[in-house]
C-alpha cells in the first residue's frame, strides 16, 4: 500500500501551476490535467465508481457506502475536496522534494539555495514537529503541499477504507478541482452532480486547525467626473478628479487597513485606480467577518464621497458596491454538526483541534453559498505559496487519521442531529 508520503512525493513531481488573468480557456493551464489523469487512474485502481475527469479538469469519483442499505440511506453523502493547481506566485516546475528525517530542531537549510533557510524563530510551528520528518523543496521552487498534501491525504484515506472494509462509512464523494489559486476553483463545478450533502476542503494549514469562517467581501467602485478645461484658462472652472480621489483617500486614511489589522478585524483597502484629471475610477476592497462591519464601511465610503462633492462643486462622484463572497459561517450556522464532527474527529485522531478563521475567501465559502456547506480541514502544511513551504509526514498522517475518524462519525448511527437539530449527538 502506498503511504501518504509516497503519494505526496508522486503528486508534487507534476507541475500543476495555474496562471492568473486567463479568460479564454479553462483550466488556465493544461498541465493541471496531467495530475488529473494520474488521479483518475489511481481512483480506478481503488475501484471507486464513476471515476472521471471532465473537459474542465474536474476529477470526481465516489466510494459506495459499506453499511447495510437501510442504515446507509440515513447517512448523508460526505464530500472531500482538494485542488490540483499550485500558486502562480512561485514556480512549481521540477520540484525536488527533500525529506529531512527526524528533525532535531534548529535551522533547516534548503540544499538548492542556501539563502532559503527555515528558522524556528520565524516558524514557531516547527517546535511542534521535533523528531518528525519534515518535507521541503530544495529551495528553488515551492513544494506544492498546497494542495497536493490534501490530495495525498484524501487518496490515502480512500485506500485505507478500501483495504479495511470493517471501518463503517456512508457514501463518499471525492473531487479534485483546478484553478483554485486563481479564484476559479468552483467556476464549473457541478454541485448537484457531486451529490454530497456536506463537504470538506482539505486545504488548511497547521495540524489541528479547522476553518469555517471567512471574510464577507465587497468591492466599491468610485467613479469621479471632474471638469476638464485647458489648464491655462482653468481658473474658477477646472475641477481635478485626481485631487478628489486624493481627498477621498485621505478621509478614509484613519480607517482600518490591511497593514494595521489582523485576527477578526476588518478593513478597507484601496487597490486600483485608472484615469486622470478629468475622469477617474478607483476600486476599494471591503472586508469584515460581520455584515454589520461591511455596512459601516459602506457608510464611511459613501460619506467620504459625499463630502468630496461638497468640497469640489461641479464634480460628480458615484459609488457602487458589489458582493464578491460572503462568510460561510452564515451558511454553516444552521448545521453546527458539520464543524463539530470535524473537531471531534481531530480529537479522536489524537490531534488538539483549534478553530481558525480565514482572512480571505475560499472555494468552501463559494460552495457553501451554492448549497454545499464546506468547511476547511488542515493538511499540516505551512508557508504556502513560498519556497519555504514545509510539511511534516506525521502531520499528513494525523490528517489522514482525522479524515478516517470523520467518516466514521458521520456513519455512526448513535450520533443524531443530522437534520440540523441543536445537538450534535457527540459523547464528550
Ligand atoms: Zn490551497
Image (cartoon, rainbow, N blue to C red):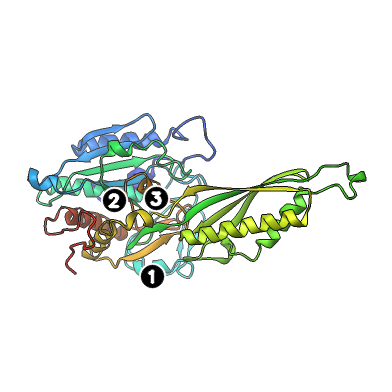
Residue marked by disc 3: 365
Q: Residue 51, percent across and down?
A: 25, 34
The answer to the question of whether label 2 and label 3 lie on touching residues, with beta carbons closer than 8 A, is no
Q: Residue 355, percent across and down?
A: 35, 64
Q: Which of the numbered marks, if any, corresponds to residue 379? A: none
Q: Which residue is at a point 11% across and 55% down the rendered structure image?
A: 413
Q: Judging from the image, what secondary structure is the residue with disc 2 in? A: helix
Relative placement, left or right, of 257 versus 13 is: right
Say above or below: 121 vs 341: below
Q: Residue 326, percent across and down?
A: 44, 52
Q: Quadrant of residue 418?
A: bottom left
Q: Which of these two is toward me, 13 or 207?
A: 207
Residue marked by disc 2: 153
Badge 1 or badge 2: first in the primary sequence: 1
Q: CA distance from mark 1 to mark 3?
A: 31 Å
Q: Which of these two is toward me, 84 or 337?
A: 337
Q: Which of the numbered marks, if any, corresponds to residue 127? A: 1
Amino acid at each position: 500500500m502506498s503511504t501518504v508520503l509516497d503519494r505526496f512525493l508522486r503528486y508534487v513531481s507534476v507541475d500543476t501551476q495555474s496562471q492568473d488573468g486567463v479568460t479564454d480557456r479553462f483550466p488556465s493551464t493544461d498541465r493541471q490535467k496531467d495530475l488529473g489523469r494520474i488521479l483518475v487512474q489511481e481512483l480506478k485502481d481503488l475501484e471507486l465508481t464513476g471515476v472521471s475527469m471532465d473537459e474542465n479538469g474536474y476529477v470526481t469519483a465516489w466510494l459506495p457506502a459499506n453499511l447495510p442499505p437501510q442504515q446507509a440511506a440515513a447517512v448523508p453523502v460526505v464530500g472531500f475536496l482538494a485542488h490540483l493547481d499550485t500558486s502562480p506566485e512561485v514556480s512549481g516546475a521540477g520540484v525536488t522534494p527533500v525529506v529531512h528525517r527526524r528533525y532535531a530542531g534548529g535551522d533547516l537549510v534548503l540544499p538548492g539555495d542556501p539563502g532559503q533557510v527555515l528558522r524556528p524563530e520565524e516558524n514557531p510551528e516547527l517546535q511542534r514537529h521535533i523528531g518528525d520528518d519534515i518535507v521541503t523543496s530544495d529551495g528553488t521552487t515551492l513544494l506544492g503541499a498546497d494542495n497536493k498534501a490534501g490530495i495525498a491525504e484524501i487518496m490515502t484515506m480512500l485506500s485505507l477504507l478500501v483495504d479495511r472494509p470493517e471501518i463503517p462509512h456512508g457514501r463518499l464523494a471525492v473531487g479534485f478541482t483546478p484553478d483554485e489559486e486563481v479564484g476559479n476553483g468552483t467556476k464549473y463545478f457541478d454541485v448537484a452532480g457531486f451529490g454530497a450533502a456536506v463537504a470538506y476542503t482539505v486545504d488548511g494549514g497547521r495540524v489541528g486547525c479547522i476553518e469555517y469562517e471567512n471574510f464577507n467581501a465587497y468591492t466599491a467602485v468610485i467613479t469621479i467626473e471632474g471638469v476638464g478645461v485647458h489648464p491655462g484658462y482653468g481658473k474658477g472652472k477646472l475641477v481635478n478628479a485626481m485631487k478628489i480621489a486624493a481627498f477621498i483617500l485621505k478621509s478614509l486614511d484613519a480607517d482600518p487597513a490591511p497593514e494595521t489589522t489582523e485576527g477578526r478585524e476588518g478593513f478597507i483597502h484601496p487597490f486600483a485606480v485608472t484615469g486622470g484629471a478629468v475622469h477617474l475610477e478607483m476600486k476599494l476592497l471591503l472586508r469584515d467577518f460581520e455584515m454589520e462591519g461591511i455596512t459601516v464601511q459602506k457608510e464611511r465610503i459613501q460619506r467620504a464621497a459625499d463630502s468630496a462633492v461638497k468640497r469640489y462643486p461641479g464634480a460628480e462622484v458615484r459609488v457602487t458596491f458589489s458582493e464578491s463572497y460572503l462568510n460561510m459561517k452564515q451558511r454553516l450556522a444552521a448545521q453546527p454538526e458539520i464543524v463539530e464532527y470535524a473537531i471531534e474527529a481531530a480529537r479522536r485522531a489524537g490531534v488538539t483541534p483549534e478553530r481558525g478563521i480565514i482572512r480571505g475567501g475560499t472555494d468552501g465559502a463559494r460552495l457553501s453559498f451554492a448549497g454545499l456547506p464546506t468547511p476547511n480541514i488542515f493538511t499540516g502544511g505551512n508557508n504556502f505559496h513560498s519556497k519555504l513551504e514545509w510539511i511534516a509526514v506525521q502531520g499528513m498522517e494525523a490528517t489522514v487519521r482525522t479524515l478516517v475518524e470523520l467518516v466514521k462519525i458521520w456513519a455512526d448511527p448513535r450520533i443524531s442531529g443530522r437534520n440540523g437539530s441543536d445537538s450534535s449527538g457527540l459523547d464528550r
